[in-house]
Image (spheres, grey):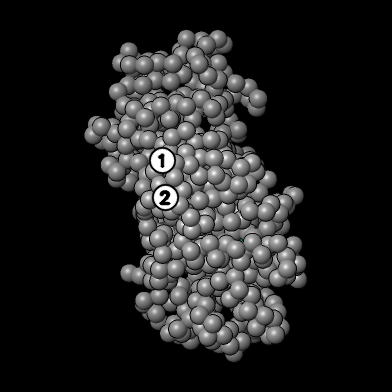
Amino acid sequence: MPGLGDATRGRLLFGGDYNPEQWPEETWHEDVRLMKAARVNSVTLGVFSWSKLEPEPGAREFGWLDTLMDLMHEHGIGVVLATPTSSPPPWLGRLHPDTLPVTEDGRTEWWGGRQHFSHSSATYRHHAAAITEDLAARYGGHPALTLWHINNEYCTADHGDQAAAAFRRWLRARYGTLDALNETWGTAFWGQHYDTWDGILPPRLPHYLRNPGQVLDFRRFTSDMLLECCTAERDIVRRHSPHVPVTTNFMPLWSGVDAWRWAREEDVVSVDLYPDPRDPLGAQHGALVQDMTRSQARGPWMLMEQAAGPVNWRGVNHPKPRGLNRLWSLQAVARGADAVCYFQWRQSRQGAEKFHSGMVGHAGEEGRTFQEITRLGADLERIAPAVTGRPVPARVAVLHDWHAWWAGDQDGRLSGRVEYPDVLSAWHRALWQAHLTTDFAHPEHDLAPYALVVVPQLYALTDAAVGNLLAYTRQGGTLVCGFLTGVADQDDRVRPGGMDARLRQLFGIRTLHEWWPLEAGETVACEGFRGTLWSEELEGDGTAEEIVPYRGGELDGLPAVLRKGRAWYLSTLPEPGPLRDLLASVARDAGVRPVLDGLPDRVEAVRRGELLFVLNHGREPVTVEVPGTHHDLLTGTDVTGRVTLGRYGAAVLRP
Ligand code: GLA
């Protein structure tokens, strides 16, 4: 099977989404000149080009794309060619309203935007397959083609009648009998018993709380249906070009698709990443998404989209200050990316994203954004030979699972303040601030490569996952679990005792009496730190070797943190500093060292292959101790003992 290596051929891919159909042909030549100046070696064509390629039903307009494919090839620029199926032409919805998705409250999502397709519509799938087939037949052998890009950011749910029929088929395959479905969804509650498959609907706007089993299965179904659309197109392009790798771009930490499952179906894992330049933790958000994408790829991955400047979909959209685009791009490379790409090459003058930045902004060639892009292109070329294909070693894993997220993120929970992505991010941040490089892993993955495994929150765990955690600790691994872990089984049935009995035994917990969620701004005192968000009324079974108690309040003296052997349980979320210190100390005991000792705040260090990346996320210059003599690939100079980094500065050091 091909991988990203086949597309990069020893280079770091650098470029972006290219939408030349928005511009007159003279601009295409200007584009090529600027691409060469910036050392762009990859463009993504065709993402939203369906109505250009098929302006009326059955027509084919490939001439413009022929010209562009040839133009790119002539200039040594590889093409990531997208199937255009995420934005069907208006005629498709007009002639076939069954291709349009329906929201939970019965509204149709019309054309006029994008992503207005129903994954369950046979008509949509038929037309999507037809245009994909012709595109692949025409360009599968084109020398410019380096990678197939299927659709774009699959994310559309459908609650309409076609989706209802597909949902029933999916449920029949899963459960076989209605009895099994009724049992698993707990339909005895509120008299929801189904006597016929035809009575089952996607979750639609109810009067009061939804059935959690139905919602959980609907999320699984939606992910599976979108994946069916994706693999159908993948199979078509593979038939025409078996040696060209295939990807589809994920949204970062997006709840809609089970990306562990999806990643197995693609040759290259790619992601779109847009941290807020004003967010003091933007770099950590980037690191989280990069670590997760690398873990899904199990190797190098592709940064398919980022912004050279502002996006236009936040309430207030800020540009990237000078140097930040380069720094965050180098961060992605440090954390395993072999491709640094953007949405989009040239900023649009019309359309919904005309205020979204491009690599060439409205200010053009003279603009700071393009000047910085040009500098970055040179930097990437300089470091590429030493970096592409190299692994990022990590001895710590953060466990993450979409099904646990979906099961826990439901109506009727005890605290609407507990948001899974926030909890996951808080734990990753603590590890990031402790300068520990982390992978992500699924709870049923082999955990043997890791000296430390942390579980920020896995509300629902399969028996296999519980068994995996127990086996991991039996074999000497260190495990730290956060609250609301192991509460339910895979069907969202609460485990007897409110937490899996095997896990309670692992941590030395006899009884979980009550959950005590905390209000906004409320904290709970524990010995040595303050907890946030959540607390628990726990009774130990006398086997824990170390207990940090709650102090004061209702839970005074009861265990907040328990450790038994190498297994830790945290029944609250410590404030950021204490969580970082706790995980750093547990990691040290497990034999895991930070990437570098004594790093100043705001400095990130990551090893990739034999290289050491040192990144200054601050505006003030810093000097960092780097024992030994190194060659800085960015400046071409040697450094001994220490390196000084300017505002948003970076060094890529080879021993
Ligand atoms: C997504 C899409 C792009 C563009 C950007 C804007 O990532 O894939 O087409 O809309 O967002 O940030």
Look at mark 2 in the image and give the residue it sits on. 630
- Residue 364 is situated, as x and y percent measured from the top left of the image, at 73, 70
Does 344 sit left or right of 567 as displayed? Answer: right
* Residue 577 in the figure: left or right of residue 6: right
Q: Is residue 447 above or below residue 544?
A: below
Name the amino acid, label 2: His
Name which residue lies at 48% across and 86% down: 138
Q: How many marks?
A: 2
Residue at (50, 70) in percent of width and height: 149
Q: Viewed as shown, does residue 236 lie left or right of 310?
A: left
Q: Amino acid at mark 1?
A: Pro
**Residue at x 28% of width, y 36% of height:** 472
Please provide percent x and percent y for residue 72: 55, 81
Residue 154 left/right relative to 4: right
- Write down the residue under mark 1: 627
- Dot 2: what SS? strand
Along the line of sight, the residue nearer the viewer: 428 or 41: 41
Q: Quadrant of the N terminus?
A: bottom left
Pointer 1 with pointer 2, Cβ within 8 A: no
Image height of 325 relative to 589, above or below = below
Classify 10 Å Cα crowding around label 2: few (below 14), some (14-19), many (20 and above). Answer: many
Q: Percent position (x, y) of residue 198?
A: 50, 57
Residue 617 seen from this side: yes
